[in-house]
Image (cartoon, rainbow, N blue to C red):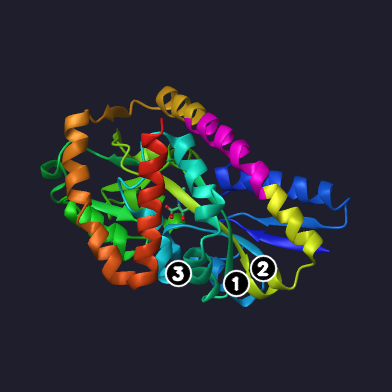
C-alpha cells in the first residue's frame, strides 16, 4: 500500500525533512506494509493544485500553509502576526498540544473542506527580504512585498505600510529579479534554497511570526483507515514534534551561514522598540480575522491566545 504525500517545498526543505522522517516511521511501524511516496513542490503543479488534489483524494497527505487560506479560511490563524510568543519551542508545543491540535473547531474547519488536520508544523521565523533596510512602517512605504495568497497577510502588510501583492512560490525568484516584486517573506532556509537571497540586498529579522504549516490528510481516506493505521499516524506525528523542531532550527541556522558566506546581503535585526511599532499595528488585524471566519474561527483564535498566555505566564 502506498500513501502519497504532497509538499509545498522542494527537496531539502523543512517539509521534505518532515515527510522523509514520517515515511520512515510509517514504514517501520507497519513492518513494511505501507510506503509513503513524497511529491516535492512542482511535481503536482502549483500550491492550490496540491490542496485540490488532497481534497479530491488524488493524493492522501499534504502540507498546507499560507495559500491554504482560500480553501480553509480558518487556517489564516497561522498567518496572524504577534499572536504566539518569542520562544519557538514553546509555540511548537502549544500548537501540538491535543487541546489545540484536536480542538473540535480546528477539526471541523478542515473536515468541512474534506480535509483532516494531523499536526501543526512551525518551520522557523518569517524573515523579510528587500532591497532596503526596513525598520519602520515608513520604510515599507511603496515596497511591493510578496505575501502568500491570503487576505489576512495582505491586511497585515497593508497595516505595516507596504503594498502587498501575491505570486506563486515558483515564480518568485524571477519576479524579484525582474523587479516586479521588491520584497518577500520566508523562513531563512527558503530564502537560501530557492536562491531568493541572491536577488535581494537585505534580510530583516522582526520575529513577527513563525512560518506555520498544517500537515493534513484527505478526510474520507483518513476516516476509512484502520484503527491500527490511525494509531501509526498519531504516534508518528507525536514523535515528529521534537524531531522537526530540532531540524528546522538547525537548517535555518546553517542556511543563514550559507547566505552570509555566499553574498554580501546585510542582516538587520529590529530592536524591541522597532518591533513594538509593528506589534501594535498587527493587533487590529485580529478583528479582520474574526470578521472573515465568524464565530468558530474566532473561538479558535481565543483558544490559541489563551493557551499562549497561560504557557508563557507559567514560565
Ligand atoms: O512562500 C511560499 O509560498 C512558500 N514558502 C515556504 C517556505 N513554504 C511553502 C509556502 O507555500
Part of the protein shown in magenta:
237-252
Q: Residue furthest left?
A: 138
What secondary structure characterizes most of the magenta part?
Answer: helix
Q: Which residue is mark 3?
A: 72
Q: Of the residues under marks 1 and 3, which one precedes in the sequence?
A: 1
Q: Is mark 3 within 8 Å of ligand 1?
A: no
Q: Which label is found at residue 53?
A: 1
Judged from the image, the secondary structure of the residue bearing numbered disc 3 is loop
150 part of magenta stretch: no
Give the SS element for disc 1.
helix
Q: Does residue 123 appear anywhere in the picture?
A: no
Please tell me whether residue 247 is drawn above or below residue 78 in the rendered image. Answer: above
- The quarter of the picture where the C terminus appears is top left
At label 3, counting other C-alpha atoms closer than 10 Å, the crowd grade (few under 14, some 14-19, many 20 or more) is many
Residue 251 falls inside the magenta stretch:
yes
Q: Position of residue 233 (x, y in %)?
A: 71, 55
Question: Do the numbered discs 1 and 2 sit on residues whose CB atoms are within 8 Å?
Answer: yes
Residue at position x 43%, y 47% from top? 211
**Horizontally, is 249 left or right of 5 in the view?**
left
| Distance CA(mark 2)–CA(mark 3) | 18 Å
| Residue closest to the eye, 21 or 37 | 21
Residue 295, image quadrant = bottom left
Circles 1 and 3: CB distance less than 8 Å? Answer: no
Image location of residue 200, percent across then percent down: 32, 39
- Give the mark, 2 or 3, whose residue is nearer the N terminus: 2
Q: Is residue 106 visible?
A: yes
The quarter of the displayed image where residue 33 is located: bottom right
In the image, is residue 214 above or below residue 267?
Answer: below
Q: Which mark is residue 59?
A: 2
Which of marks 2 and 1 precedes in the sequence?
A: 1
Q: Is residue 212 left or right of residue 114?
A: left
| Mark 1 → mark 2, Cα distance in angstroms | 6 Å
Amino acid at each position: 500500500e502506498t500513501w502519497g504525500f504532497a509538499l509545498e517545498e522542494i527537496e531539502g526543505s523543512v517539509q521534505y525533512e518532515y515527510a522523509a522522517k514520517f515515511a520512515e516511521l510509517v514504514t517501520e511501524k507497519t513492518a513494511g506494509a505501507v510506503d509513503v511516496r513524497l511529491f516535492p513542490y512542482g511535481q503536482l503543479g502549483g500550491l492550490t493544485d496540491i490542496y485540490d488534489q488532497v481534497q479530491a483524494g488524488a493524493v492522501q497527505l499534504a502540507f498546507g500553509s499560507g495559500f491554504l487560506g482560500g480553501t480553509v479560511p480558518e487556517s489564516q490563524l497561522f498567518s496572524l502576526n504577534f499572536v504566539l510568543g518569542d520562544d519557538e519551542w514553546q509555540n511548537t508545543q502549544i500548537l501540538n498540544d491535543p487541546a489545540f491540535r484536536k480542538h473540535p473547531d480546528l477539526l471541523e474547519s478542515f473536515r468541512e473542506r474534506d480535509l483532516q488536520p494531523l499536526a501543526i508544523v512551525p518551520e522557523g521565523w518569517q524573515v523579510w527580504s528587500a532591497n532596503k533596510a526596513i525598520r519602520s512602517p515608513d520604510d515599507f512605504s511603496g515596497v511591493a512585498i510578496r505575501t502568500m495568497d491570503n487576505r489576512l497577510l495582505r491586511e497585515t502588510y497593508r497595516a505595516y505600510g507596504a503594498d502587498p501583492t501575491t505570486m506563486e512560490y515558483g515564480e518568485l525568484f524571477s519576479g524579484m529579479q525582474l523587479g516586479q516584486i521588491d520584497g518577500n517573506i520566508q523562513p531563512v532556509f527558503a530564502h537560501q534554497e530557492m536562491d531568493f537571497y541572491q536577488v535581494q540586498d537585505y534580510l530583516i529579522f522582526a520575529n513577527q511570526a513563525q512560518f506555520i504549516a498544517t500537515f493534513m490528510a484527505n478526510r474520507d481516506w483518513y476516516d476509512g483507515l484502520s484503527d491500527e493505521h490511525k494509531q501509526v499516524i498519531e504516534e508518528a506525528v507525536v514523535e515528529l514534534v521534537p524531531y522537526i523542531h530540532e531540524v528546522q532550527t538547525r537548517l535555518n541556522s546553517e542556511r543563514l551561514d550559507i547566505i552570509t558566506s555566499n553574498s554580501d546581503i546585510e542582516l538587520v535585526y529590529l530592536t524591541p522598540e522597532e518591533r513594538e511599532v509593528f506589534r501594535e499595528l498587527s493587533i487590529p488585524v485580529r478583528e479582520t480575522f474574526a470578521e472573515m471566519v465568524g464565530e468558530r474561527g474566532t473561538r479558535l483564535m481565543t483558544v490559541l491566545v489563551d493557551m499562549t498566555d497561560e504557557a508563557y505566564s507559567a514560565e
